Amino acid sequence: MTSTHSLPHLAVEGMSVTYRNGHTALESASFRLHGGMLCALIGVNGSGKSTLFKSIMGMVRPSAGRVTLDGEPISRALKQNRIAYVPQSEEVDWNFPVLVRDVVMMGRYGRMNFLRIAAKEDHRQVDEALARVGLTDLQHRQIGELSGGQKKRVFLARALAQQGRVLLLDEPFTGVDVQTENAIVDLLKALRAEGHLILVSTHNLASVPAFCDSAVLINRTVLAAGPLADTFTRANLERAFGGVLASLNLPEAMAGGAP
């Protein structure tokens, strides 16, 4: 069992992101998460979910605020490969000629020397990551030959091979079948039990209580953050989704926490 002293603690404090065209994608967003949490990041399209992920990963420079991991600037954690990111499928060039195993090996680059020559430990971690996502038999396939669900699992395996204690997943269930979604959920639950801190953006509200224990609701700022029983309520969801929520049949029982 993981010691509480070794659990990662992520803090987003007053983060704002304004692009050069003057568009403010995030404004004064704040929340805190710790290891052993599986947190849903919930909001409509354009609410700032992807911007938040990219700000944490150093891909977008905040105009205000800061992000820390274990009390240290996020830049240090990124250099130490302590945070792994699974992007949306739309951000990946699936026509690029690369094998599944090579993509997963990219998760080890930060632990290699400048020549990027894989050591035995790198190969071992890649083998283990492929096995955990059920892709060992497909490791020598071109990534463009895979199904949508298999492609998602490749990038999840890359994150696992990186050995980051913090995992950020941007819409991992989009375009996957029910069997693949269930397999990903089971893996995320296992990683939570191992002490990982997991933040998952999703549009599938109905599945959130089944696997998440907390939520961050966002609409250009954080509307609510905390345990699912406190945040995943109809009132908060209506604030986040507005009229969109009216078309969804969400019983009040959905305001409970994950088992």
Image: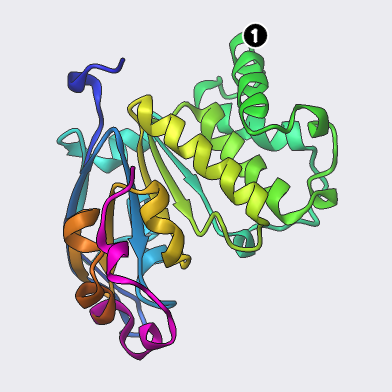
Q: In the rendered view of the protein, which quadrant contains the C terminus?
A: top left
Question: In the figure, is residue 221 to the left or right of 114?
Answer: left
Residue 190 position by quadrant: top left
Q: Main secondary structure of the magenta part?
A: helix
Q: Is residue 74 above or below residue 46?
A: above
The answer, for residue 247, to whether it is visible in the render is yes
Pick the front one: 21 or 98: 98
Pick the front one: 194 or 169: 194
**Magenta span of residues:** 239-259
Tag 1: amino acid? Lys
Pick the front one: 116 or 226: 226
Q: Is residue 234 above or below residue 164?
A: below
Q: Is residue 243 above or below residue 92?
A: below
Q: Residue furthest top?
A: 120
Residue 51 lies, in percent from the top left, at: 38, 65
Residue sitting at 54 percent across and 54 percent down?
Answer: 172
Q: Secondary structure at mark 1?
A: helix
